[in-house]
Image: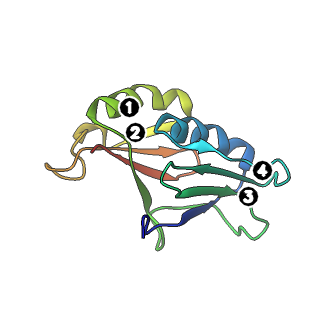
Amino acid sequence: MTNVVHHIELWTSDIESATPSFDWLLKSIGWTARHDPAWPAGRTWQHPSGVYIVLEQSPDVTGIHERTRAGLNHVALRAGDREQLDVLRKKCGGHGWTELFSDRYPHAGGPQHTALFIENHEGFELELVAD
């Protein structure tokens, strides 16, 4: 088995406003957009390994996303090396992401863990981990 994760699906309350931040970020770390024009409520990005992320505006969404409630807190993705993290850190604000734990960058996850933690306007947190 090459990948233990097949895909990750995130629900959004507004696909049009959520797409640009995810599109910029995922393309910046090597994912490819694989959007199906016949499915206007969804967007998909695929990693070279085969794993993919789906962002969907489902009619079943019943409220806003809150990462601090029970359930999924964040998704952690590999994002290259420390130099790549520094570039993403500088650019993320211009693409809909806000840095979390900036006072502890790049070791907010602990002294042996190098990562950038960011959140978009909808409250989705991504942890970008340096190899």
The answer to which image quadrant residue 130 occupies is: top left
Q: Amino acid at mark 4?
A: Asp
Residue topped by disc 1: 89
Of labels 2 and 3, the one closer to you:
3
Instruction: Point out which mark residue 99 bears.
Output: 2
Mark toward the start of the polypeptide (1 vs 3): 3
Q: Amino acid at mark 3?
A: Gln
Mark toward the start of the polypeptide (2 vs 3): 3
Mark toward the start of the polypeptide (1 vs 4): 4
Q: CA distance from mark 1 to mark 4?
A: 30 Å
- Residue found at x 78% / y 55%: 41
Q: CA distance from mark 2 to mark 4?
A: 30 Å
Residue contact at pointers 1 and 2, CB within 8 angstroms: yes
Residue topped by disc 4: 36
Residue topped by disc 3: 57
Q: CA distance from mark 4 to mark 3?
A: 14 Å
Mark toward the start of the polypeptide (2 vs 4): 4
Q: Amino acid at mark 2?
A: Glu
Of helix, strand and loop, which one carries label 4? loop
